[in-house]
Image (tube, grey):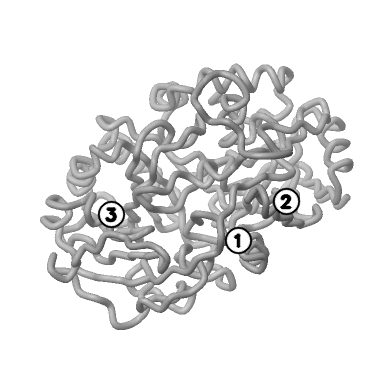
Amino acid sequence: MTTTETPGTVGTNWAGNVEYAARELLEPTSVDELRAAVTAHPQVTALGSRHSFNRIADTDAVQVSLARMPGTVDVDGERSVARVAAGLTHARVAAALDAAGYALPNLASLPHISVAGAVQTGTHGSGVRNPSLASSVVGLEIVRADGTLDVVGDTAGGHAERDGSAGPSDELDAHRVGIGALGIVTAVHLAVEPSFEVAQTIHTGLSWDAVDAGFEDIMSAGYSVSMFTGFTDDGIRQVWTKRRTDRDDPVVDLEALGARPSTSPLHPVPGSEAAGVTEQGGVPGPWFERLPHFRSSFTPSNGAEIQCEYLLPVADAVPAIHALRAIADRLAPVLFVSEIRRIAADTAWLAPSSGRDSVAFHFTFRRDTEGVAAVLPLIDEALAPFDARPHWGKVTSMTSGRLHEVYPKLADFTAVADRVDPGGRFRNAFLRDLLG
C-alpha cells in the first residue's frame, strides 16, 4: 500500500480551489488492504478523482484513494449487468464496455471522473428520459466502518426491486448517492444495454422568447440536450443536441426558432479552443465519444474554474431562468458559462433529481474564490422559491438546515449513516456539519 504523509503533500482537488488538509493519503492495492486501512484509523475519507469543488472529500485525518486497486470491468451479458471497480474513470469503463458490445445509458460531461465518485455525489448527464448516473446502479460492494465488506442490492442475479416499498430497494436507494457517509465503495454493479451510436449537432443564437415559448420541446429535441448561456440578453449562445441513431427523437426545427447551425466545432466557453470537445457536425460515433462534451484524452480547463449546480422541478424552469437573468450583471464578472440540462426523476434518496423530473442550472466560474463566494448567496436567493437542490460535489452557500429542507430524505439517510457508522469513522467536517 502506498502512503503519502506530511500535511500539504496530499495536494489539491482537480480545479485547485481546495487544498486538502489530510495528514496522510493511503492507496491500498487490494480490498484486504483497504479493510485494514479503514479499521486502523479513527477517521477516513474516500478520495475519488478529485473532481469535487467543495470539501466533501477533504479531511484533517486520513484520505483513502482507490486509484491503485485492480481496475476490472466484468460484464454479465445474460443479466445485462457490469461489475466495475469503483476507482475507474468513466472513460476507462466505457471503452471496456463498448469493446464487449455494451453501453451505459448516459454519461456526464466529463469522462475523466471516477465511477464511484460520480454516483456517490449524484452526478448526471442530460435528457428528458435520463435520470442521474446513480440510477444505473443495481448493487454495490462497500467497506463498512468495522472493516467488513458488505453487499447492497442484488449483485448476484437480476436487478434489485425498485417498487418504492420498504426493504431491499430502500436500502439500495439510500446507498446509490451515499456522499461518502456509509462506507468506501469498492465495486459498482451497473445496468448496461447494447452499444449505440450518437450524432451531435450545435446551434447558436437561440432567443429567450423561443425558450420561454417552448422550453420542454427544445430540451426534448434529442436523447441529450444542453443549452449554454450567460443569462444575458443574447439568449442561449449554444444548443448541443445529441441524438441516438437507433431512435426517432422528436425533431424540433431550431432554425425555424431563429437559431443557426454551427459550421465549425465550438467549445461551450466562448473564445476557448475547441480541440478537446467531442466531435460535432452530426457525424455519428460511439456513445462514449459523443455523450460527454469533452474527449477523454483531453483535460479541459484544469485549475481554472469553480463549479456550482442546482436542480429544481422542471415546471419551474422558465421562472427560474427569469430569476437568474435578473442577476446576470452580478454573475458576469466571474461566470465563464452556465449550462441548462434536463434530468428525469430518480429514486436515489439524495439524488438532486430524486422524486421529480428536474432542470439543472450549472455554473462554471472563474477560479476567483472570493468573487464566487459573493455571488453564491445571490443564486441561492434567486432559486429559493423553487426548492433548488445543490449538487453534492460543487460549491453552495446553503446551510445544513436548508439542505435538510430541500432534501426530504436527508433525515432518513442520517439514520442509515448512524446505523452503519455509529462511531462516525467516515464523517469529515463536511459530513459532521450536514449530518451531525
The residue indicated by pointer 1 is 102
Q: Which residue matches tag 2?
A: 85
- Name the quadrant containing residue 270: bottom left
Q: CA distance from mark 1 to mark 3?
A: 26 Å
Q: Amino acid at mark 3?
A: Met
Nearer-the-camera pick, 109 or 436: 109
Local crowd size for mark 2, using a 10 Å CA cut-off: few (<14), some (14–19), many (≥20): many
Mark 2 vs mark 3: which is more N-terminal?
Answer: 2
The residue located at (34%, 39%) in the rendering is 357
User: Is 328 drawn above or below residue 421 in the view shown?
Assistant: below
| Mark 1: secondary structure | strand
Task: State which quadrant residue 172 falls in.
Answer: top right
Question: Residue beneath label 3, please?
Answer: 219
Which x, y percent locates residue 386?
A: 27, 32
Please say whether residue 228 is visible from this viewpoint. no
Packing grade of label 3 (10 A; few <14, some 14-19, many >=20) is: many
Residue 346 x, y percent position in the rendering? 45, 37
